[in-house]
Image: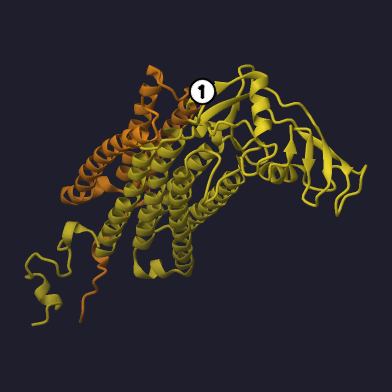
Chain colours: A orange, B yellow
Amino acid sequence: MHQRDDTYEYSLDHIHDEEHGKIVRKKIYQITIALTLLTLAEVMMGVFVKHGDTMSWHIVKWMFISMTVVKASLIVWYFMHMRDETLDFKDIILWFYIVFIIDLTIVLLHEGFVYGTVLHGFYGIWE
Amino acid sequence: MALYDEQTLEQAPDGWIGGRGNSPFHITYGKIMMWFFLFSDALTFGGFLVSLGFFRYSATEAWPIAEQSFTEFPVLGNGYPLMYVAFMTFLLIISSVTMVLAVEAGHSKNKRDVTKWLLLTIIGGMIFVGSQAWEWKHFIHGSEWGKVELADGSLATVINGPNGDAKFGEIESYTVTTAGSKYKAGQVLTAKDLDLNEAWEHAAVAGKIMNGKQITLADGSVASIQKEKDENVRLAIRKTGGKYQQGDIIDGQDALNQYYASISGTPNKIIYGANLIENEYGPKLYSNLFFFITGFHGFHVTIGIIVNIIVFINVLAGTYERRGHYEMVEKSGLYWHFVDLVWVFVFTFFYLL
């Protein structure tokens, strides 16, 4: 008698009753409000602070990136139930990706900037 | 000795083969594989977005500013910078919330709630894809002004004047002066006879609008233009030419003169909208990347909607009740959250930064 491989057991582990469900739902609504407020703040900043070389624009630029990362981590942590997973699993999925993408971003942005200055030189824009 | 034999399972050593607490990470293989797939997809999208950064940093032409290009809202018209995109982001986040509520209802084995939340998620996703299609259409169609090539070879777009938003004077009618194959002399063409704006754009690209006063229509007839005054127009130089540098601004009547001078006579001095060859917003790569990245994302959303519909049908049919758990809803939910996650990043890097 073969045991099925899509293992009911641990899935059945997740079944909980209505009481626990209420607590979980409350948490979900809290995270929803947090995400909405973050999005609103981002959009307001995007509309009212103009692109340019001003200090306020640079602050806003970094705030965009940090708020986006916060939103992403809220979604992964609570909505995708990452916080319920084992530490090993979190390591595998999250750490590898984060380290890789930060490295790739830094390298490509730097290369892009250097390439841009080279192209500007070709077109004679940089005196 | 059968490996799967129930009796020997108790003595089975910890490992990969079935049984309580013996799986990698204590979750089902299906869920692990979904996470691995999402990991690889995240690498794909991460690569796209980082390459967007690369091309932006190396662009020789001015990169478009999103809050100036994306200002339209369906039905309400122009003048709502970034509002529609904010609505789309909010919509996708809410559909993610309904999805996680569906997963939670699955954990409570509440079939009615699962169907309710899953249906809302599917509807949210469909509205999102529809909105994205609307954005594409507007992006492809372009603004009323387009991008002009001035006499010295520099490229310029119209920006708002110091006193208010730039207004393209509404075209009221064309009065035919010289007859062509379709229209007779003296005929007054209004919006009922032909699409005035479309005729304007075609004639502008062909260089057949003389000094903003006279237009040669598609059938060869020449007409004078009755048009309201353009207001608050300034030209911003996007690409350096012989006389103007990138970043210069031409003010006042000189701006209007130069604009109309560039569409009189020589054809192909103006570009409207965006396609795969050229675009009015900035470097070619901008529109290419826009279509590619948002297109890939929209494709993922569509696949997610289809998967959700299949899962929805199964929920209704009671497959998961019989199986004893709603794990499939959870796996589909992981995919949907991933799609939302990617959108959050695309929204930031395309529309905000």
Snapshot quadrant of residue B258? top right
Query: Can you give x and y, in whole percent of width and height, for residue B16 in the image?
Result: 14, 67
**Looking at the image, residue B335 lies above or below residue B59:** below
> Considering the numbered disc 1 on the image, is that residue within a helix, a strand or a loop?
loop
Q: Is residue B330 left or right of residue A46?
A: left
Q: Estimate the x, y position of residue A24 in percent, counting from the top left.
A: 35, 44
Q: Residue at x 37, y 47 (%)?
A: A21
- Residue closest to the eye, B309 or B6: B309
Q: Quadrant of the N terminus of chain A?
A: bottom left
- Asked whether B332 or B280 is in front, the reply is B280
Disc 1 is attached to a residue of which chain? Answer: B
Residue A114 visible (yes or no): yes
Q: Quarter of the image holding residue A67?
A: top left
Q: Which residue is mark 1?
A: B248
Instruction: Identify the residue shown where x is 85% and y is 54%.
Output: B181
Amino acid on which disc 1 is placed: Asp
Q: Position of residue B21 (x, y in %)?
A: 16, 61
Q: In the rendered image of this protein, does residue B92 appear above or below residue B246? A: below
Nearer to us in this view, A82 or B72: B72
Residue B53 falls left or right of residue B154? left
Residue in the image at 44% along x and 64% along y? B311
Res B165 visible: no
Q: Position of residue B247 (x, y in %)?
A: 48, 25
